[in-house]
Image (spheres, rainbow, N blue to C red):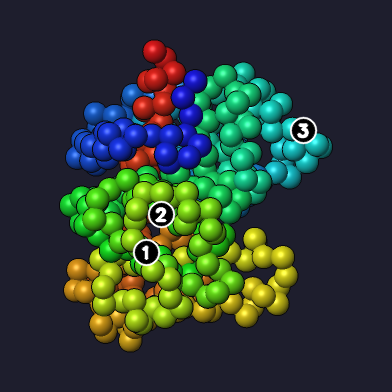
Amino acid sequence: MRSLIDILDFSVEELDSLISVANDIIANPQKYSEKCKGKKLATLFFEPSTRTRLSFEAAMLELGGSVLGFSEAASSSAAKGESIADTAKTVSCYADIIAMRHPKEGAPLVAANNASIPVINAGDGGHNHPTQTLADLLTIYREKGGFNNLTIGFCGDLKFGRTVHSLIAAMARYTGIKIVLISPEELKLPSYVKKDILEKNGIPYSQTTSLEEAMPQLDILYMTRVQRERFFNEEDYLRLKDSYILDTRKLVNAKKDLCIMHPLPRVNEISVEIDKDSRACYFKQVLNGKYMRMALILKLLQEAAE
Ligand code: CP
């Protein structure tokens, strides 16, 4: 049974095909409005979410299917001690496909190993967030026309930022990619991502604490929130939370066609004045996420039926 747990579960060709379907959905939404008639998506969210859960639900509804699920662990039998494996086996009796978010890294993989229907990782701890990467890839494609020869700056919490880990893995498969890692010492990209992804694929990268210094070379700036929920103590979070705040002053030396991205939610790291800048792409990412999740649901249900 095909699932999506890690963005590398899909080949570059499969991602190209998802982008092509998403673009066709954008151009011809009516064509897709009954494609999932009679099918059910279960959204199992053990952690808070606005965009991912609601965009999955909107995606399935716009495909003519239905949705069931829960939005917090407390309202599921996980609160009584039920395992992920038993939850996955149970939900397989009621639904055709699962989207799961969980604070424990690897939980969606455990679900996939026990479910008899496709499972989509909607974010697992500080590990991966492959469907955010789908949203990011469609945004980059539509803004930049492709994926090669881009210099991408990742800024903020690169340690716990699961969207960063997944997008770096996806971009490392294209040519001419350069990565600039901008973070405080305490929130640097984990060494396993550097070794297993960047170094293994020969991707040139640099590390800095200065957003201003990095800015002039960037084609894409991917800002991230400092992930309060992953910190062991509040004191460290308070010290680091406002390490980077993007405002108009910091964009003075930026490229005119810079693409400013953020997976959202934002706290303080992008000043709201930037929202009016034509280079701000983060609300485009939100919408693109729905179209890519539609394409993903179609792909996984089609493969499950074969
Ligand atoms: N980008 C993202 O995962 O947002 P939510 O936490 O609101 O789902």
Q: Is residue 281 visible?
A: no
Q: Is residue 192 above or below residue 66?
A: below
Q: Which residue is mark 3?
A: 82
Residue at the image position 37 percent from the left and 20 percent from the top: 302
Q: Residue 79: x and y, percent? A: 78, 41
Under mark 1, the amino acid is: Tyr
Q: Earlier in the sequence, mark 3 or mark 2?
A: 3
* Number of marks in the rendered image: 3
Q: Quadrant of residue 248?
A: bottom left
Residue at the image position 39 percent from the left and 13 percent from the top: 306
Q: Which residue is mark 1?
A: 205
Question: Residue pushed farthest bottom?
Answer: 249
Under mark 3, the amino acid is: Glu
- Relative depth, front residue between 250 and 54: 250
Under mark 2, the amino acid is: Leu
Q: Which numbered tag is attached to residue 198?
A: 2
Alpha carbon distance from label 1 to label 2? 8 Å
Please give left or right for residue 191 compared with residue 204 in the image: right
